[in-house]
Structure formats: structure tokens, C-alpha cells
Amino acid sequence: MNYMLRSRWWSFGFRSAIMLYFIILIVLPILGVYTQSFSLGWAPFWESVSDPLAWKAVLLTIRLALIATVINVLIGTMIGWVLIRYRFFGRRILNSLVDLPFALPTAVGGLMILLLLGPGSFVGDAAQRLGFEIVFHEPAIVIAMLFVTFPFVIRAVQPLLEEMDKAEEEAAYTLGASKAKTFLRVIFPTMLPGILSGAMLAFSRGLAEFGAVVLVAGNIPGKTLIASVYIFGEVESDNPQGAAAVSIILLTLSFLILWLLNVIQSRRSGV
Amino acid sequence: MHIEVSGLNKSFGDFHAVRDVSFSIEKGHLIGLLGPSGGGKTSILRMLAGLETPSSGDIVFHGKRVNDLPPQERGIGFVFQNYALFKHMTVYDNVAFGLKIKKFSKSQIRDRVMELVELTGLKGFEHRYPHQLSGGQRQRVAFARALAPEPQLLLLDEPFAAIDAKIRQELRTWLKEMIERVGITSIFVTHDQDEAIEVADEIMIINKGRLEQKGSPWDIYKSPQTQFVASFIGESTIVEDVSKLKGFEEAAGWPGAQALIRPEFIEVGKPGEFRLQSATEQGKVKHLHFRGSEWMVEVEVGSITLITYRSLEKEVLHPGDEVRVLVHRAYMFNQSDSWMMENRLKEDPMPIHI
Amino acid sequence: MKKLWITLTYAVFLVLLIAPLVRIFSGSWAEGWDGFIEALTRPQSLHALWMTFLIVIIVTALNTLFGVMLAIYLVRADWLGRRMKQLLNSIVDLPFAVSPVIGGLMIVLLLGPNTIIGTFFEDIGFKVVYAMPGMIIATLFVTFPMMVREVMPVLQEIGSQQEEAASTLGAYSWYTFWHVTWPSIRWGVIYGVVLTVARSMGEFGAVLVVSGNIINKTQTATTLVYQDVENFNIVAANSVALVLAAISIGLLLLMEWAKKRKEVH
């Protein structure tokens, strides 16, 4: 009995320690940002957020992340489909390569884009001759976001396609549906939840991206300065309260997306 | 092991899974917990094992209260519904698991495992993994694993549920023999009445968390104490107004009472087949179903449809035939009571004394 | 039609993934083998790679330990109510939604030199922000969900019956964990480790904010790449990036391998 009592105390202490670690590591910092941004009251908060450079940075981030997400949905859906449904030379290698952006440090990713498209490179020069700029302009930011969020849609769509019973598709054919119609009415609805959740993950990651973007964006305030780089600048110039204020806009947005994603997923598993 | 359970309750949130269950089990008996799915049988079993904590009530093994004892210290063996074999271990290691924990020596473990492997007919399969075995073999491994540490009580949760109908029959007989040979007190859960009747020494019928009746299979069949038990065990037809049947007129004295009539309480046949014509009733054959060894007859008596069986030896009936129907007896139920009612007209009104 | 789709897929991979990868390889050879070696053997490169190595080891060890245990609690513990479990479960994902820069900012706000906790630690001679501990905490924060998210589904899939069977056979929790649970979750944990290593090695934003990026002191491999690029020292940046990219590809292969093993078992 004594032994049991002791082991009960042990397990109680143990689990409390784990929970405490968890709360301190994750919850406390997040609360910290929220309290800090309001630490001086509403007025300074409002001032930080309504600084044109700040809200321009936030809007720019949202706009570019949206563009990257749309492109991602298109190519991600296609690649997810091709990698699952077709058998061709190099399929396995390509499939492993999808995860590369997850494995690669984002700063390295940014450097790659800079080298490939930057001044002095073949593509960069060609583009310049044609009269438009890539690096240090918006296209480079979109490309950087695209690169780091590349796996999300693919990896969300693939399991759904794999799970899908081939018989469903065949049933549609026997009922007289054309290939296009079958895709639109049978296959696409199956993929849709994956596309949506992949897109949301990609969007929230795009909003948050820093490493890849900071190297290629040029970071001109009001033009190519995205939110996370703006926050970094505020921290560097010793204005943590301003950094926190912009942070919570970005954070709240991301949390909303995450929450939506949870709702979608729980509804899907509920059905 | 002698087991005494009193006032056992278990709630999961708002759901009251087990309500005030009390029973005692003699050493060496084989008990079947029978009832519909979701009725609380498995919860009772898991509380006996210590895998679930009772909300209230006492569980006593051998005169010692074990409520606070973890499963590790209860001296039980548990066979799970899906066997829960350790899938990364061979048959040998699965069976040896409990012995290793008890720190038996290597040679002791080998002797005991080989003994059980032989007993369960798994010789030659010791080095297979669970996924290389058939359902019946996995069940035997689960059984051997549970028996290895020599538990005092064996608990089996739906032991045959995951096995095909064909092998199930064979395994039932095997399990009953095996448990008798080992002589261990055992409790198994099932929702299949044939299984419970065939395997168990004693049956406990559980419905909606309550213990409805406990007794030998024959007792329960012969004298069910509640309507649920009567309708759950064996086949039967419920008749709303039994006073319309000949010989049961006095049932009108209990308004609201229902009758439950088993097929074997009823005889049908051509008029010449009955000795006591006066007790029979006019009926009409509605349907006939061939049941392999006999006919199942659906017969209409007035507005009541009754079901009975008829031997293949007797004259074949046809749908639409006019027949005589004799109802020997019926179980009567109302809100509070249950009793047996015999056909009054079966007593020969003019007995002939020789 | 099928041909067109496959060609398109190849094109996307070529442009988006393969071309940049090749470019990094060729870029670091721009000044030959000597240039590459020289860039790598600079004291700040060696120091930065050492820092990254330390952070990866410490963060991976801590996250594996706490991640596996938290996953077990979140899946198995009955003493946490269902609601509580759901809440904790969604909290686990929060770091995914937090921009790394903000993650770093949080640590600075909470433990920086101007805060109560920060001054307290500084007084006892323990510097958190702009030093190693802060960098580790920031990386821990960012990579925390990886392990939990890999292990939880595996635990859910294997169910608790095998563990219950072990307990009825007399095994206590520690023995049950090592002999019954661990063999089943092993490959999930290894996959989680690989992911955590990759992510903590590549972490940039959070570390940049917390570390202050001081050469030879708090500079990691990724922040060194950043600084080299800012200083237009492209060849040097390239060389360090090449090392990181090569490790990443190695990790990617490891991931593939772990994934396959995970599916077999």
C-alpha cells in the first residue's frame, strides 16, 4: 500500500511536470505577446497598428500569400493527382522530393531563389531585358512563399485520392458520365476537403514566412516589406511594443485559420 | 476463486452503464454474461478485471475487497474481444510475457509455455507472429497467454465474436473442455444466447445495466422471471389479448396483461391428431417455412398469428389448410408480475376411469 | 492528356525544386574547391555550424522526451476530461500558426533584459536572450508540435487494448511502455525525430530575433547564411547553404525510409 501511495505521488508529480512544461513553453509566450501589445493601453496599440507602413505591410502580406495560395492550389492539386494516379518514370523520386521545402532551411530556400533569379543570373537578366523585375519585387516574394508552402496542398490531397474507391469512379462511368463530368462530380468533391485544408495551411504558412522572403524581398517599406520582416525591423529598432501590436494582428489571423481548419476537419471526421 | 459483487454501479458521464448489480460466483464455475450489445456486460467484466473503476459498490475476491487493487495485482487472466495479442512478438513471447514479469527462470518459462502451447494445440506455431495466424489460432494464443501466469479467475470478452461461424462451434466446445480441465473460475461475455446456453454452467442476463436473472440455462429457459428474459431467451410470440384464445378466457381478469407463447407450447395438426378436440381452436395455415429438420408453421387463429414447429414425419400441411391449434400454456406479464397460465380445457372435463 | 499532365508535373518540379537545388551546388563551386573549403573553415562558419549542431541535439532530445509523453497523455489519460483534452490538443498546433519571427519576439518579450524574469536571471548570472538558452527555447517552441503530431495518430491507431492486456498479465506502466507500446510507436517517433532535426536545423526567424546574431557568439548556420548574403559574400553563403542543403537531403532520404518502415509495422 505504501508502495502504491508513493507511486501515485510520483505519477501525479510527473504528469504535472509535463503539463507545466507544455503550458509554459506554448501558452505563456503567446499570452505574453497579447499582453505586451496592450501594455501601454489602447492608444499606443492603435498608433502602432495604424502606422501606414505597418498596415501596408500586413495588407501586402495577405495579398501575396493569397496569390501564392491560389497558385499552390492549382499546381498542388495537379501534382497530387498525377503522383497518385499515374505510373511513370521517376514518380517515386518526385514524390519524395515534394517534402524538400519542409526539410530545407528556409534561409537556404531564399538563397536558392536569389541565386537563380537574381541580378547576374540567366533568368534575372532575361527578365530585366524584357522589362520586368523579379528579385527585390513582389514576384520574388510570391515565389518564395510558393516554394516554402509547396508540399501542403499535395500532401493534403494525396491521402484522399488514395483512400477513394476506384469503384466510385467506375460507377460514374457505367452510369454514363463522361470523363470530365466524372472528374467534376465525383473526384473533385472527394479532393475538395484536402484542397481546402491544404490551402489554409499554405496560406497561414505564407503569412508567417520570414526566412525565404527576407533574402529576396528587398524589404522596401511600403512596397516590398512584408509583415514578418516589418516585425523583425521593429524588434531591431528596439520597439517591442510596436512589433507586438502588428504581431497580434498576424497571430489572430493565423489562429482563426487554424480554428477554421479544425472545424472543417472535425466535421469531416464526424460524417 | 469465490467472487462476491454487491451494489455495483458505473457511470460514464451521463450514461449509467451498470446499475446496482449484485451477484456471487462459486469457485470453479463457468459463468456467461448474456445480454444485448451495449447493455453493460463488458463494463462489469472490465470492473472485475480492474481496468475500470466502479462508481460505487464492492468487488470481493476470496473475502478480500479488491476495488483499489490495480489489474496487475488481482490475479486474473483476461481474453480480449480482438485478442489484443502483442503484434510484434511471436506466439512464444506472447505466452511468456506474464511469466517474464513474474521473474520465472528461463527454463521454468520454457516448460510452462510449451505445456500451454501443447494444451492449446499450437505446437509448431511458437515462432509465428500473430498476423501469420488464423482467427481461431489467435484466440487460442490469447487464451494460453491469459492462462500462463496461473490466474485465479479468467475473464473473456466476447471470445468468439471475431471468428467465422464454422469454426466458432468447434472452438466453443474446445473452450468449455479446456476450462473444465484447468478448473478455473471463468466469466465470459456474449450477446449470443446459443453460445451462453451451450457453454455456461450458469447464465447472468444483463439488460440496460441491470442484472435481470441469474441461473442455470435450463432454469432461465423454464422459468424466466422478467419479460425481457422470457423474450430474449428462446423464441416466442407476444400476444396482446390472450383471452381470445380458447382455454385462456380467464386472462380477461387481468387487463393489460400480455402473454408470451413459445413455439413448443403450441401444437398444430389435422383434427384427427388431437385427443382432446375440445381444447383446440380453429386455425388457418398462413405460411410454411422449411427449416432443415422441421417445418416452421405460421398459423392464424382469429386475429392472432402464432408460430410453431412441426415434425417432418407428420402429414405435410399447405398454406390455406384449415387446422386445429392447441395452445398448452402461456407466460403472463403485467407491469409488476409474471406467472404461468395453463390451458384450462386441457383438464379432461369427463375423465374416463378404467 | 495523361502525357500533358505528367510533363507539366515534371516542369513544376524542375523549375521550383530541382533548378534551385542545382544552382546551390554549382554556386558554391564558383571559386573552386578551395573557395568552398575556405568559406567553410572560417572561424565564424565553424562556430555557427557548431551552434546549430548543439541546438539540434538539445532541442531534439527535449522535444522527443516531452513530445512522446505529452502524446501519450493526450491520447490515453482519462484523468483529463474530454473537453480539456480537446483544448490541449488544439494548443499543440499553435506554434504552427505562429510566424517564427513572432515566436522569437515572444521569447524576447517574456525573458528579455527589460523584463522581470529576464533581470532576475541576469542577476544570477544567467543570460537568456541574446544567448544560447533563449535560442534553444525559441527553437523548442517552433518545433514542439512535430513529435506530438507524429506520435498521436500512431497511438490512436494501435488502441489501448494491448496495454490493458499487459496490465492484466501483471506488467506495470514502465514495463508496458518499453515492451508493448514502444515497439509499436518506434517508427513514428523516429520520423518525428527526423522532422524535428530538420526543422530545428533550419530554424531562422525565431533564432535571428532571439540571438541578436552576434558573430562567433550566437550565430547559427542559417543566420550566418543570412549575414553573408547581406554582406554580398555570396560564395561564402553558398558554401554554408550547401552543407545545410546536403544534410536536408540526407534527412529527406531518412524520412522516406522511416515512412516506409512505419507503414510496414
Image (cartoon, coloured by chain):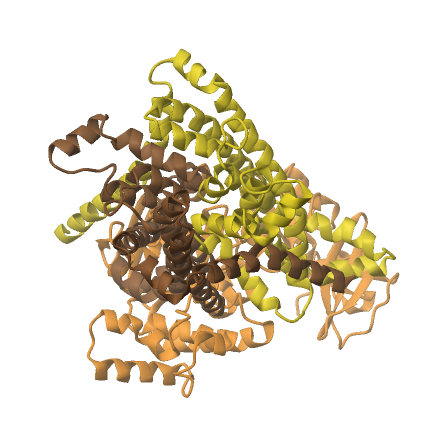
Q: Position of residue B177 (x, y in %)?
A: 42, 78
Q: Position of residue C219 (x, y in %)?
A: 29, 46
Q: Position of residue C113 (x, y in %)?
A: 22, 29
Q: Is residue C60 above or below residue B100?
A: above
Foreground pick, C108 / B265: C108
Residue A207 falls left or right of residue A80: left
Chain identifier of the brown chain:
C
Quadrant where the C terminus of chain A is found in the figure:
top right
User: Residue at (51%, 35%) from the top-left corner?
Assistant: A259
Chain identifier of the orange chain:
B
Chain identifier of the yellow chain:
A
Q: Position of residue C101 (x, y in %)?
A: 40, 37
**Residue B264 visible, this orientation:** no
User: Residue at (39%, 58%) from the top-left corner?
Assistant: C239
Name of the residue lying farthest toward the left: C124
Q: Is residue B196 above or below residue B223?
A: below
